[in-house]
Image (tube, rainbow, N blue to C red):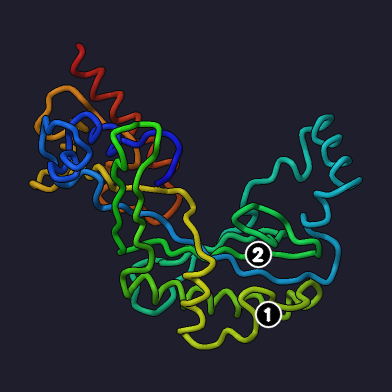
Amino acid sequence: MQPGPRKPPQLMELSGIGNPQIIRELGIEVRHALPGLGENYLDYFCTGMNWRVKQPVTLNEQTRGLQLAKAVMRYAVTRQGILTLGPGLVHGFVRTREGLAGTDVQYFFMHASYANAAERILDRYPGMTIGVTQLRPQSRGSIHAGTPDPYTGRVIRPNFLAAEEDRRAMVEGMKIARQIFDQPALDAFREREVSPGPDCRTDEDWLAFARANGQTIYHICGTCRMGIDPGSVIDPNLRVNGISNPRIADASIMPTIISGNTQAAVFMIAEKGADLILSEAK
């Protein structure tokens, strides 16, 4: 079970809307059947690869002690410096094999490395990281209410790497990332690969590393899929199928995930939703 803000599938299931079996198991009266609600969970899966850096020029040492104090002062006075940086300074897009219509892996580079990625604790030595993310995941999961109490969380089953294509893309994407970091241009900075390390050679090694170290980048989509088929949750006017008033306008309506960050697409969905509401109010 996961705490956090309420999501559309959870809110509707607690209102009696959704898969009748799930709603009854919560002890809630079924008011409207929508079997597809909460299914079709899509998200990006990302694995970070780390290198130790020869020179003290990374955020690992620049965010501690006196260096951090200087950075805070610089930001306070100029609104510049390391405190203005986002989670990725350099991005790249690649095709992991010939014949693909578009790129299928995105890279995020940062001159920092985590000793504990889950807790966001930086290494004590200079480090750099490249995040490897598959752009077109085929694996589908689900998200549903876990209890009738809206404050006790949801049951989330991401089902990452369930599809063969997802596993293949991640493995090949990490191999290419290693090739990039092995280039002579980085000789002055690259000391050694820390994670997964030189012992990671076979496809089985790469996949095991991805499973053990990968995580979401929080671009969840699809659990209130838009469409006109019986399994869809909302119609093309963003209304919940079979109910006249409720609308949904967020990433959950996407039938499939876009091949890039979802923010701009969500803005577009919100703008379209506002236009639909205003046009009907006239």
In terms of secondary structure, where does tag 1 sit?
loop
Is 170 in front, or is 207?
Answer: 207
Side of 268 where 188 appears, left or right:
right
Q: Are marks 2 and 1 in contact (CB under 8 Å)?
A: no
Left or right side of 258 for 241: left
Residue appearing at x 61%, y 65% in the figure: 130
Residue carrying label 2:
129
> In whole angstroms, how far apart are the C-alphas of marks 2 and 1?
15 Å
Q: Which residue is mark 1?
A: 183
Question: Would you say 222 lies left or right of 198 here?
Answer: left
**Residue for point 39% across, 39% down:** 153
Give percent across and percent down for residue 237. 18, 32
Quarter holding the C terminus? top left
Q: Give SS at disc 2.
A: strand
The crowd level at tag 1 (other Cα within 10 Å; few <14, some 14-19, many 20+) is few
> Which x, y percent locates residue 90?
62, 58
**What is the three-letter code of the residue carrying label 2?**
Thr
Dot in front, 2 or 1: 2
Residue visible at 39% across and 54% down?
A: 43
Q: Which comes sooner in the sequence, label 2 or label 1?
A: 2
Task: Say what amino acid the circle numbered 1 marks.
Answer: Gln
